[in-house]
């Protein structure tokens, strides 16, 4: 834990400056064979900052970045926020309409984007949204579709529209800007200045823009690294996209605030990931359960030396379940969301395996949690479950362009929509999303419990349980079953498994069987259960069986 909470960094620029002073020549970033020290990273940040100023970026400018995980992403984030600009990371999953929505909603004036990544051609999408870019001059784009957008810079394009500039020309533009201008602008950035505008997934509605200030992000970035007990000797591998709060706060700031080395991987590819972990002697990792599963299923999992990996965040409980001793793994368990700068409550890496498996730890310094009855707002006693409400320095300022009264109560607590409880020791125990609960015949049914049982079925890659409307019971259980590639499941096998493992009221009345590529996702990679429910209802109307294949 940082010696003094009041000595935590107040801005992102201060966080990086502290690390440069302490760890200057140690490795900060490892990116496709390229290595940057903390001093190198600071130099690149300064270069980008001068270039941004040359293009008219100043305090309060809304600057968007659409790019995969790479060195330029990290340096650009520090450069833009260091000037006091509002930094808007854009999802690399964005399709044309996703991009149009976020660019307009965020009022982005300066857009920096990769021309294309994987299957997405972002430049083509942008030209379709603002065809005026083919006729305008750089810096003088005017379009009714995106009225705030003036300048576009493109990385990696073979051919540019007339109104866009290349990344090389952007970098060169900073040569005429004196260094003392950058230093002067950084001094004027205040901890209460808006820093990040991060978009949450819209599984049931349009994504929301979460406004966070410098003090919140810098503070939490430092604390997250403290709880993980990171040091300058650690090497961190991860695959969270950087536009996620988990990527740009938990991983990026948690790592760089402690002098550790961060391995960047543009796209997740299991063989390459395992190679990097072994080659760079990674001892810390951050990953999702499905990412771990892909790593474990790869033939190289048993061939690579991964013995150093013992820190980080993610499904390390699955490793313990598979026979790895809990004392050998220092992974932490945390509770949080984009609205709380990721972690709001967190266990320590040094806590017992039991504590880290069963709880999300204590609330972080300076913050408060209350558990309420979602029906009448009564504050629950310890051990009683209810809705988790949070208040403190890491909680967002507001949702952009939305009335805060719909999300904060009179005491200033943000209502998360999550169910959980505080145990007798005061540690948080998260249960599930409040809105995910299925209420059938007056009985509450947890989707997670159903999914755990369905996942036991051989040949199943994953499952999703959700409510379906029922005139008689209010709601009944529906589910989607994702089968592994090359596997087949008979209706009889599915029905037999459900009968053996689930009581009648928890048993799905309808089930959609599909492959992973057909699972509907949001622009930030979350499963759209509402869409699955709609597909299942439509299919059941046409089918003779309760199990339909999609």
Image: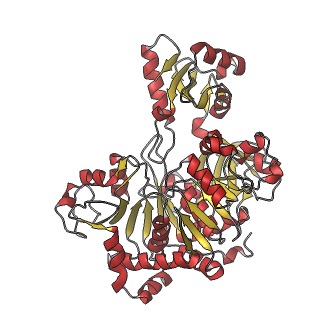
- Farthest residue, direction left: 135
Task: Tell which of 308 and 245 is nearer to you.
Answer: 308
Residue lying farthest top? 544
- Give the percent coordinates (x, y) of residue 98: 37, 48
100 or 382: which is nearer to us?
A: 100
Q: Position of residue 426 (x, y in %)?
A: 79, 54
Question: Where 288 falls versus 213 (above or below)?
Answer: above
For image coordinates 58% across by 36% down, the residue present is 436
Give the residue drawn at x 71%, y 21%: 501
Pick the quarter of the image with the N terminus.
bottom right
Q: In the drawing, does residue 395 fall left or right of residue 524? A: right
| Residue 395 visible to the viewer | no
- Rendered residue at 59%/70% (across/down): 28
Q: How has the structure been colored for display?
A: secondary structure
Q: Is residue 19 left or right of residue 355?
A: left
The image position of residue 468, as x and y in percent, is 53, 25
In this image, 436 relative to 143: left or right? right
- Point out residue 459 in the picture as x, y percentages from the top left corner: 61, 26
Q: In the rendered image, is residue 98 in sight?
A: yes
Which residue is pictured at 76% across the width and 47% down the height? 357
Q: Is residue 182 above or below residue 415?
A: below
Tell me which corner region of the image, top left, top right, bottom left or bottom right, holds residue 64: bottom left
Give the quadrant of residue 113.
Answer: bottom left
Left or right placement of residue 124 versus residue 414 in this view: left
Residue situated furthest front in the rendering: 303
């Amino acid at each position: 834990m940082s010696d003094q909470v009041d000595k935590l960094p107040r801005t992102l620029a201060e966080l990086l400056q502290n690390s440069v002073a302490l760890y200057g020549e140690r490795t900060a970033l490892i990116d496709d064979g390229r290595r940057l020290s903390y001093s190198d990273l600071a130099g690149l940040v300064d270069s980008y900052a001068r270039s941004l100023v040359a293009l008219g970026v100043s305090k309060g400018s809304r600057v968007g970045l659409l790019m995969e995980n790479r060195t330029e992403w990290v340096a650009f984030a520090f450069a833009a926020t260091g000037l006091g600009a509002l930094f808007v990371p854009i999802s690399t999953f964005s399709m044309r309409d996703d991009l149009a929505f976020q660019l307009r909603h965020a009022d982005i004036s300066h857009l920096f984007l990769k021309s294309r990544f994987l299957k997405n051609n972002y430049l083509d999408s942008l030209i379709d949204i603002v065809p005026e870019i083919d006729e305008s001059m750089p810096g003088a784009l005017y379009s009714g579709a995106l009225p705030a957008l003036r300048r576009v810079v493109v990385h990696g394009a073979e051919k540019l529209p007339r109104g866009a500039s290349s990344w090389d020309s952007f970098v060169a533009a900073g040569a005429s800007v004196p260094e003392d201008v950058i230093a002067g602008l950084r001094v004027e950035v205040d901890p209460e200045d808006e820093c990040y505008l991060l978009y949450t997934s819209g599984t049931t509605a349009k994504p929301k823009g979460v406004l966070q200030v410098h003090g919140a992000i810098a503070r939490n970035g430092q604390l997250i690294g403290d709880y993980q007990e990171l040091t300058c000797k650690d090497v961190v591998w991860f695959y969270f996209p950087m536009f996620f709060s988990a990527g740009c706060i938990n991983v990026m700031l948690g790592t760089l605030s402690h002098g550790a080395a961060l391995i960047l991987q543009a796209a997740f590819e299991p063989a390459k990931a395992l190679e990097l972990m072994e080659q760079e002697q990674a001892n810390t990792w951050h990953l999702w359960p499905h990412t771990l599963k892909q790593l474990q299923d790869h033939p190289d999992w048993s061939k690579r030396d991964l013995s150093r990996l013992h820190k980080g965040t993610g499904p390390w409980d699955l490793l313990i379940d598979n026979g790895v001793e809990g004392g050998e793994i220092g992974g932490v368990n945390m509770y949080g969301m984009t609205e709380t700068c990721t972690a709001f409550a967190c266990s320590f890496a040094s806590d017992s395996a039991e504590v880290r498996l069963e709880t999300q730890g204590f609330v972080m310094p300076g913050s408060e949690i209350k558990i309420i009855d979602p029906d009448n707002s009564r504050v629950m006693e310890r051990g009683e479950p209810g809705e988790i409400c949070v208040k403190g320095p890491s909680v967002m300022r507001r949702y952009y362009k939305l009335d805060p009264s719909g999300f904060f109560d009179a005491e200033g607590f943000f209502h998360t929509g999550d169910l959980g409880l505080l145990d007798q020791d005061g540690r948080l125990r998260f249960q599930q999303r409040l809105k995910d609960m299925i209420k059938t015949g007056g009985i509450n049914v947890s989707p997670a419990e159903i999914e755990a049982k369905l996942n036991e079925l051989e040949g199943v890659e994953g499952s999703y349980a959700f409510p379906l409307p029922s005139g008689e019971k209010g709601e009944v259980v529906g589910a989607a079953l994702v089968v592994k590639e090359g596997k087949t499941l008979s209706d009889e096998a599915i029905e037999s498994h459900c009968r053996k493992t689930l009581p009648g009221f928890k048993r799905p009345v309808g089930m959609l069987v599909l492959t992973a590529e057909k699972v509907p996702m949001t622009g930030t990679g979350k499963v759209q259960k509402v869409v699955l429910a709609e597909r299942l209802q439509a299919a059941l109307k046409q089918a003779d069986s309760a199990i339909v294949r999609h």
